[in-house]
Amino acid sequence: MYLISGCLLGHNCKYNGGNNYNEEVCDFYENHSCVSVCPEGSSGLPTPRPPAEYVGMRILDREGTDVTEAFERGAALSLERAFDEARRRGETIEGAVLKANSPSCGSGKIYDGTFSGRLVQGDGCFAAKLKERGIKVISEKEINNGKF
């Protein structure tokens, strides 16, 4: 079973109320056992909401509000729900296709906290939790590179 960021499937859960629909990810979803996830939505954060980025070890929105706890809660809830669904299906979580650069789902590179579009090395809080458990995480940019 694979986890897929809901925004990549066209769900309007992105911070601005839109989505990041990706046809290749949708094709992957249709041809594999998958579950849609949105850690930010699971946390109870509203949609739309101000964009947020890591600033040091904290996640702040553009207005300066510390939303770290909400992001961490959403990551933990999404992880728990994913493992529950895998158990229900009698499957293991083989990997995840998550939204690049996100403070929740980014893998390898995330926005630098200046809201300027610059990237730094790092993982979003949900991606980090998956990696800690040995689950491979790729972004939508890697979906056609045969990473799984």
Image: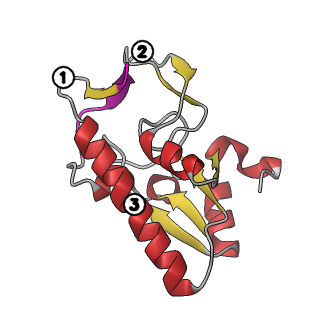
Q: Quadrant of residue 79?
A: bottom left
> In whole angstroms, how far apart are the C-alphas of marks 1 and 2?
14 Å
Residue 78, labelled with which disc? 3
Instruction: Report the amino acid beneath label 3.
Output: Ser
- The span picked out in magenta is 48-57
Q: Position of residue 46 (x, y in %)?
A: 20, 49
- Where does the N terminus fall, quadrant-wise? bottom right
Q: Is residue 135 magenta?
A: no
Residue, disc 2: 116
Q: Position of residue 137 (x, y in %)?
A: 63, 49
Dot placed on the residue nearer the N-terminal end, 1 or 2 = 1
Relative to 8, 67 lies left or right: left
Q: Position of residue 60 (x, y in %)?
A: 27, 26
Pointer 2 and pointer 3: residues touching (CB < 8 Å)? no
Q: SS of the residue at dot 1? A: loop
Residue 39, visible in the rendered structure: yes
Residue, disc 1: 63
Relative to 146, 25 lies left or right: left
Pointer 1 and pointer 2: residues touching (CB < 8 Å)? no
Residue placed most toward the observer, 3 or 134: 134
Instruction: Report the amino acid beneath label 2.
Output: Ser
